[in-house]
Amino acid sequence: MKLQAALDALPYLLSAAGTTLWISLAGIALGQVLGGAVLLCRASRSRALRRAAAVYVSFFRGVPLLVQLLLVYYFLPYVGIDVPPLVAAIGTLGLASGAYVSEIFRGSLNAIPRGQAEAALALGFSSVSVWLHILLPQMLRISTPALVNELILLLKASSLISVVGVTELTRTSHTFAASTYRPFEVYITAALIYLAMNLTLAAFGALLERRLAVAG
Amino acid sequence: MDFSLFLHYGPSLLSGLGVTILCWAAGAALGIVAGFVIALLRRLPIPPLRWLLRALVEIVRGTPFLVQLYLLYDGGPAIGLRLADIPTGILALGIYGSAYFAEIFRAGFESVPPGQIEAALSLGMSPGAILWRIRLPTMLVAIVPSLTNMLIILSKEVVVLSVIAVPELMYQVQSMAAETFAAFETILALALLYWLMVELVSHLGRVAEHRVTAFMGAA
């Protein structure tokens, strides 16, 4: 063990950790949009839409993320779309987390008593304002802990995008490990950075949960 | 593309599937045994041991599997741990899984009503008999869904082993993709196969859940 090797790599690893963090945040933001859209499809009257949403969720939860990444990576040139690997990677993370987020949303929607929406409709709320004023605010509160958890999972999963050539924390530590011949120290440092990010996120999630909790 | 290619690559794909199943089964078995031991040890009234185990579980759960794999594979030799690729993969899966399984077993232990244990003690049952005949069967009902879920997660982590050249299914498919220039079709085939496998395992999990619940209901 040489501490110096870890210290030399630290500034580069930290800046790469920034990349990892914003990629994960972008992924979960996209995932929330997709998850919300999937939830609307699942709640819709059209049978085809409901079926399509169920297949989407089942596929992206059933196929390993690395396979999904390679699938998108090879699919885009196959149909003639040329985007940078970073965009493809964020897109795939978003697609994958969308499937999980839609399930989180579905769970939180089920946790809201049905009578509330019915009462609002009976009072003359439009279905849009039922969503905006009754369901969404509560769903957001109920799903926050699970969403923070999903962000942590995504942050760890984002290490896989190093395999398709995006330079983030894992890729940078791989390069450093190979060039310095100090893989043990470099990977331990990278692991500790991941751990620190995840513990911070978990603490932030716990704080949010307390803030959003309804008194009584 | 020419689908006879799949026939030509049949043997290597089959051996890849074999390695995938081997790594999955061995890694999961290792993870379940180690996780159970960790959960048991965490119940001992030795605070330093509990803190240490808790820290280990948090470290494993807080870091990406890929980084753990690189650490073991590239960093292992630096501290004198030299293993072939398949054993490295199995060990990595086992370590990764053990942290999650330990948490599942911990929750399982906590789900057993204390009254049952007190009743068993007052009937004169030994601690071993209580573990085997009261705690385990009762907690099994509570943890079967989480166990299935974790087994599915582990099966999906097996593809990550391709990164350190473990010749599992993903690795074989990637070599096939590189040789045939039909990358998209081969990866799509792999994705569909995985989807099928995961659906199958989660179906089996639901069957197991049903059986266990029915058994406990009858008892």
Image (cartoon, rainbow, N blue to C red):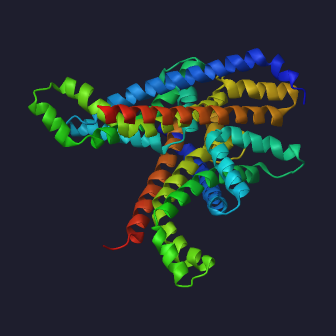
Q: Residue at x 70, y 31 (%)?
A: B193
Does residue A200 appear left or right of residue A161 in this picture?
Answer: left
Where residue B31 sits: x, y (%)?
44, 28
Q: Quadrant of residue B210?
A: top left
Where is B146 relative to B215, above or below?
below
Q: Nearer the viewer, residue A178 or A151?
A: A151
* Residue B167 visible, this orientation: no
Q: Residue furthest top?
A: B11
Where is A83 relative to A174, above or below?
below
Where residue A179 sits: x, y (%)?
65, 34
- Total marks shown come to 0
Does residue B139 appear left or right of residue B87 in this picture?
Answer: left
Q: Residue at x 47, y 74 (%)?
A: A116
* Residue B31 visible, this orientation: yes
Q: Residue at x 30, y 73 (%)?
A: A216
Does residue A177 appear left or right of residue A135 in this picture?
Answer: right
Q: Nearer the viewer, residue B203 or A145?
A: B203
Where residue B202 sits: x, y (%)?
55, 36
Where residue B12 sits: x, y (%)?
74, 17
Where is B158 relative to A107, above or below?
above
Q: Residue at x 52, y 79 (%)?
A: A120
Q: Nearer the viewer, residue A185 or A17?
A: A17
Q: Quadrant of residue A183?
A: top right
